[in-house]
Amino acid sequence: MEGFFSTSEVEKEPDSVIGYIINDFDDRCETPFWTAYKRYAIETNDSWHTPGHSGGASFRNSPYINDFYRFYGRNTFISDLSVSVDSLGSLSDSSNCIGQAQKLVANTFSVKESFFVTNGSSTSNKIVLQTLLREGDKVIVDRNCHKSVHYGVIQARAMPLYLDSMFNPDYGIFAPPSLQQLRQLLHDNQDAKLVVLTGCTYDGLLTDLKQVVEAAHSYGVKVFIDEAWFAYAGFHPRYRPYSAIEAGADYVTHSAHKVVSAFSQASYIHVNDPEFDKDFFKEVYAIHTSTSPQYQLIASLDVCRKQLEMEGFSIISRLLQHVDELKHKAKEFTRIRILDTANFAGMFTHFSQDNIGHDPLKILIDVSELDYSNQAIHGFLMDEVGLEIEKFTHSTLLVLLTFGGSKSKLIRLFNALNKLDSGHVSLRKSKTLQPLPQEIPPITLTTLPADAFFAERELLPLHESEGRVAAGLITPYPPGIPLLVPGQLVEKAHIDYLYSLMKQKVTIQGLHDSHLYVQVS
Ligand SMILES: Cc1ncc(COP(=O)(O)O)c(C=O)c1O
């Protein structure tokens, strides 16, 4: 036998396999929820159930807000159903076609169970953390994790042990934490319950998760990977070595809306944990889930799976080829560089040792040699190619090539970069952003983050906060790494760091007019 069929039999009698192939194709193409939902929306003439606009009638018939109806069009409204439609099923009990669609997702992603979440991976992350952690449980967390992870740890009343940020101030980007530190923390905290990492950073740096899972599981510690930016990881051989599911992670979350085809806020939770407590998970899921979820989001998660199953590989292959071509042409530039694995290896000492990878679809462009301000570059790219830059630091721009990407888009990007590189633009010449401070002060917790977060709090001017305990999360963006978490002692180094960022007009989430919340002492 070779794979599923014997080659010689197939050669002799090709018709014998056609039935299998057609059936398999049909199975992979199924969209149980989307199919039933579309049929219901089209066939139903009158709506007597919620939502109250009744198929759009209350918008359409209003002299004041009928423009809302006209903008979105009839289908948006007739398909805005609610959970009162029994036959379509419900998220809370995975009944009917929602449950069938989730099973297909689990099959496509090769996991035991998958769940739909309609409030983003921000909520998926909190659901996983609240399912797994109890008061005081130790959880090893990458400090660079998305804020939903930090809030999830607070909600679960767990005790985080932070992996240091590996930050490169020259480019303003961070790499995954070092595996050496992870192994050390695991060794020193064998009673830890969970390791939480971001599988693929915003800039596309990829952790060798097989090593992470192997290390954590050797101590009986579960692994949860936030793969918000990497839902396509399992659908191309180039990415598979860095896929959390392939690596054997117990829990994985995907923002399907970020890089593949789903509506905003559509997210998957995948579970492979052999000790999965599904009953408790479902209760936690209910805490975080509306009883009136947006069916359009659920439908988009259903068709998103179909696309990944049917053409995930070919779309990714095409996109990778377009990026290769862009990079090749960009070699002509004299000042702009598209950064690649070799550049990242030069930025981070643990890059090669930890076998860190990079997703080329996250295009990080070094513009440090240009003498225009970032605002000017941003404005130019917006006018020239309608490009809303994902993220920029003082020296880089991040452009994401997602499933909606095309060769034409990259051609336009290249042409615009070419103009910037050659100076054929009339932009103001002045650099406004400076490199970020070299060191990010470490986190020293004085108490459980939840205790500080839920304690009585007061707002203090930053310069008066030294020696107090932070009550909220303070996150400068970029780089997006929390500087202060609830329960952390505010030290002079934090205050100096924040002032230096404020001078550079960096956005600081959690700071209110140079004031921050601290625990009342
Ligand atoms: C690493 C990471 N995880 C989770 C999230 C939250 O995802 P969502 O926007 O789907 O809520 C983000 C959002 O940017 C993120 O960067």
Image (tube, rainbow, N blue to C red):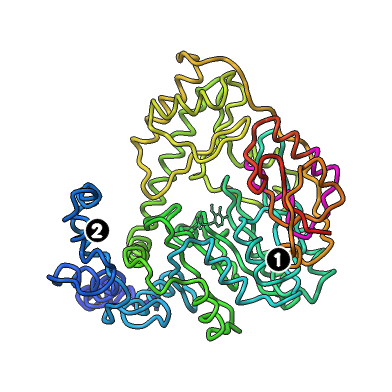
Give the total number of marks visible in the rendering.
Answer: 2
Ligand 1 neighbours mark 2 (CB distance < 8 Å): no
Check disc 1 and give the amino acid type: Phe
Tell me where residue 390 appears, x and y as whole percent.
50, 41
Q: For the residue carrying disc 1, how many other residues have a C-alpha within 10 Å: few (<14), some (14-19), or many (20+)? A: some
Please tell me whether residue 476 belongs to the stretch shown in magenta: yes
Above-or-below relation of 73 to 424: below
- The circle on residue 454 is 1
Q: Which residue is mark 2?
A: 76
Residues shaded magenta: 475-496
Tell me where residue 117 appears, x and y as whole percent.
45, 68
Q: Quadrant of the C terminus?
A: bottom right
In the displayed structure image, the side of residue 237 where residue 224 appears, left or right: right
Tell me where residue 291 appears, x and y as whole percent.
40, 74
Residue drawn at (46%, 67%) of the image? 268
SS assignment for the magenta stretch, majority: loop
Q: For the residue carrying disc 2, how many other residues have a C-alpha within 10 Å: few (<14), some (14-19), or many (20+)? A: some
